[in-house]
Amino acid sequence: MSPKKIILRFGKDISDKPIIYNLVKNYDLVINIIKANVNPKKEGTLVLELTGEKYNEGIEYLKSQGVRVQPLAEEVFRSEDKCTNCGVCTDICPTGALYMKRPSMEVMFNSDNCIVCQICLQICPYKAMEVRF
Amino acid sequence: MVIERTYAEINEKIKSGKVVVMTAEEVISLVEEKGVSEAARQVDVVTTGTFAPMCSSGVFLNFGHPKPRIKMQKTWLNGVSAYTGLAAVDAYLGATELPEDDPCNSKYPGKFSYGGGHVIQDLVARNPVLLEAVAHGTDCYPRRELETMITLDDINEATLFNPRNAYQNYNCAVNLSNKTVYTYLGMLKPNLGNAHYCSAGQLSPLLNDPYFLTVGIGTRIFLGGGIGYVAWHGNQHFPGIQKDQAGKEYGPAGGTLAVIGDLKQMKPNWLVGTSILGYGATLTVGIGIPIPVINEEVMRCVSVTDKELYAPIVDYGEAYGQRVSGNLGYVSYAELKTGRIRINGKEVPAAPLSSYSKAREIASISKEWLRKGQFFLAEPVKLLPSYKDGIEAKSLEIKNI
Ligand code: SF4
Ligand code: SF4
């Protein structure tokens, strides 16, 4: 079973219940927490990678507890603030989604060509490339 | 008529708002159109710029004394160690220093997501920074430890002092080996998979003063978004002229600058913490040198184009690390900027580490400063060593002891 990525949203009424504990214990799922956040209104967002035979039952359990479950569509984007237009990503991006405009030597990002390989996230010296869920 | 100008004359024109300034990019077409003499007659100052990782950078800090006082023996800023083998509350934080617990390359290639350069950027951005220190305690400095938050405005001085910045020229790095390598010039794919270079070429400060006719000790510069000065020549200052085996010349090799300035007036977008995968943390520094057109020879130098400037191609797969001398030939910055070069008959994609568009921005900001009378030129106290001084690089001999 390959891991599946999902976003879970918890209302403030259930954010203190041991839902994730039960999910792991009763459905034998391996979880990898990608991102976790509780806002000041006590509403929680959790991005998880889930692996296990009882994946579908686990999802049903989450829904029965009032958790909103959403599959994850990943998208890579560029922070215009952090990008210095250095260009070092342009010969590494495999699809040319990151490319150099000439002769101005500005770095462009065409997200239509991006295959979310995430190599740019690793090699960008300024952490300008981010993945959005 | 021979064109000559003094620094004082140029500064008078800056004061009266009559100074004529062009960037090193703009002046190229003027010289092509009107010739060197006429361009020298028209233009007083030519601005340059570069924005790239510069590892030999750091900041001297004086924290002020707590009550009771301390003679710091070891200090950390956001967990990154700063050298305190100086007076009681003085420290030097280097750009490439890493947190004590950084996994480095134990999980290869390491991320190096935070280091000295990032602390410097945090300080300039006025973010609160955790200061920790330990001491052995003396009669005059009884305190043995401290932990507090500081901001750049809380401390006495923060003097950026970078012993080696603004490389005149740099290698174009490739990888001849059959595995990916992670270098300070970025990720290099095996079997000539790509080529990385790091220079602003025709906009680069020291490529516009190849013979050091104007840049010297005391030259006022754009440094990290504020004003700084050339303090000295940088270390590893090798301002010779590159030649191939047949003796053909390929322009300047590698002069460098030591620069200094008050960190408190710099900007976080021009001093940027940098993480190089598999290599380390560092600081990307923005530097610009306005070059006074004191004579026609200076104008001839600043009109240089990417077609006449060359980088040596060096194998970082093996030769560089093993210190095997020689190179794979020279490539012009004009060719590099097309994004494709030819090496050993193979077409290789090329990409820069140095941001040309930021270099252009620095040159135009400097131009605005001069035009608005916010920046005056400083005549150097002494010019820096040039190709005439015949400086040779030394290597470190490993002796049997
Ligand atoms: S490597 Fe990062 S900073 Fe450089 S151009 Fe690409 S996204 Fe921008
Ligand atoms: S994720 Fe991959 S394809 Fe998308 S921009 Fe980054 S390197 Fe290119």
Image: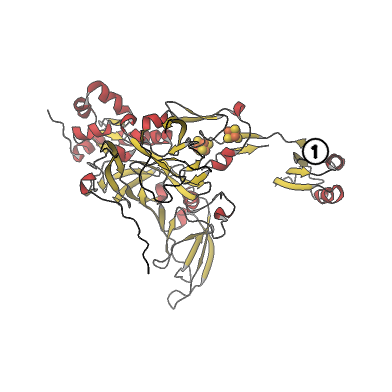
A65, B172: nearer the viewer? B172
A116, B230: nearer the viewer? A116
Q: Crowdedness of circle 1 by 10 Å Cα count: few (<14), some, many (20+)?
A: some
From the top left corner, tell me how far across and down residue B216 is, in percent: 25, 47
Farthest-out residue, bottom: B139
Quadrant (top left/top right/bottom left/bottom right) for the N terminus of chain B: top left
From the top left corner, tell me how far across and down residue B191 is, in percent: 50, 38
Q: Residue at x 73, y 45 (%)?
A: A41
B16, B389: nearer the viewer? B389
From the top left corner, tell me how far across and down residue A102 is, in percent: 44, 26
Residue B280 shows in this picture: yes
Locate residue A87 relative to residue A23 in the image: left or right: left
Q: Residue at x 57, y 59 (%)?
A: B101
- Above or below — where is A99 with respect to B272? above
- Badge 1 residue CB within 8 Å of ligand 2: no
A83, B301: nearer the viewer? B301
Locate residue B68 relative to residue B210 in the image: left or right: right
Label 1 is placed on what type of residue? Arg
- Local secondary structure at mark 1: strand
Q: Residue at x 76, y 47 (%)?
A: A31
Number of numbered discs on residues: 1
Name the subunit of mark 1: A
Residue A38 shows in this picture: no
From the top left corner, tell me how far across and down residue B399 is, in percent: 36, 64
Q: Which residue is mark 1?
A: A68
Locate residue B145 relative to residue B220 in the image: left or right: right
Quadrant (top left/top right/bottom left/bottom right) for the C terminus of chain B: bottom left
